[in-house]
């Protein structure tokens, strides 16, 4: 599927799914099913904000680890492309929600936060990488 078609499908999927919610701040909270669709977009940035030890125990394929508790966290986040969509996840959704707020303040345009985090991803038995 071409990139433009993928983007159209993504927009339709996100707007149709009832379980996604757009917060007042412009951050979209997505279900694991919606996230799987978002991952099909070529230029999406998938960010795991858990600790390196949590990441080593298992993570979603093609994610990059940027530790929310790292002293360099804010500097690391702004190295990402602000114009490309970003999907965030942590263990349960608390750290990723805080990260999403920081990214919004930093000027990121499209921010998606995985509802229920990595725990929910594992619960529905999606693939993980060890």
Image: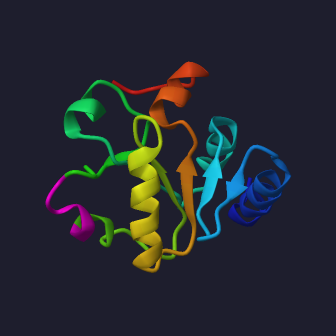
Q: Position of residue 19 (x, y in %)?
A: 75, 43
Instruction: Name the residue: 44% across, 36% down.
Output: 61
Q: Is residue 78 left or right of residue 72?
A: right
For residue 72, which quarter of the picture? bottom left
Image quadrant for the C terminus?
Answer: top left
Q: Residue 46, can we see it?
A: no
Q: Please, is residue 34 above or below residue 12 in the view?
A: above
Q: Please, is residue 93 above or below residue 1 in the view?
A: above
Q: Residue 62, can we see it?
A: yes
Q: Position of residue 79 (x, y in %)?
A: 30, 71
Which color scheme is applied? rainbow
Q: Position of residue 69 (x, y in %)?
A: 21, 51
Residue 32 falls inside the magenta stretch: no
- Which residues fall within the magenta stretch? 70-75
Instruction: Name the residue: 82% across, 46% down.
Output: 18
- Seen from this angle, which residue lies furthest bottom? 107
- Seen from this angle, which residue lies furthest left? 71
Instruction: Name the residue: 74% across, 56% down.
Output: 10
- Between residue 31 and residue 58, name the one nearer to us: 31
Q: Please, is residue 91 above or below residue 85 in the view?
A: above
Instruction: Name the residue: 64% across, 47% down.
Output: 30
For residue 105, which quarter of the picture? bottom left
Q: Position of residue 42 (x, y in %)?
A: 57, 57
Q: How many marks?
A: 0
Residue 71 falls inside the magenta stretch: yes
């Amino acid at each position: 599927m071409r990139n433009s078609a993928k983007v159209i499908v993504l927009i339709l999927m996100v707007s149709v799914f009832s379980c996604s919610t757009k917060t007042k701040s412009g951050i979209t909270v997505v279900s694991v099913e919606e996230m799987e669709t978002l991952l099909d977009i070529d230029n999406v940035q998938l960010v795991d904000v858990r600790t390196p030890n949590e990441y080593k125990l298992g993570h979603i394929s093609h994610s990059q680890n940027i530790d929310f508790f790292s002293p360099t966290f804010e500097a690391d986040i702004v190295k990402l492309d602000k114009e490309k969509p970003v999907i965030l996840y942590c263990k349960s959704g608390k750290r990723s929600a805080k990260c999403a707020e920081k990214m919004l303040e930093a000027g990121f345009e499209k921010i998606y936060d995985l509802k229920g985090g990595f725990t929910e991803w594992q619960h529905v038995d999606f693939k993980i990488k060890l």
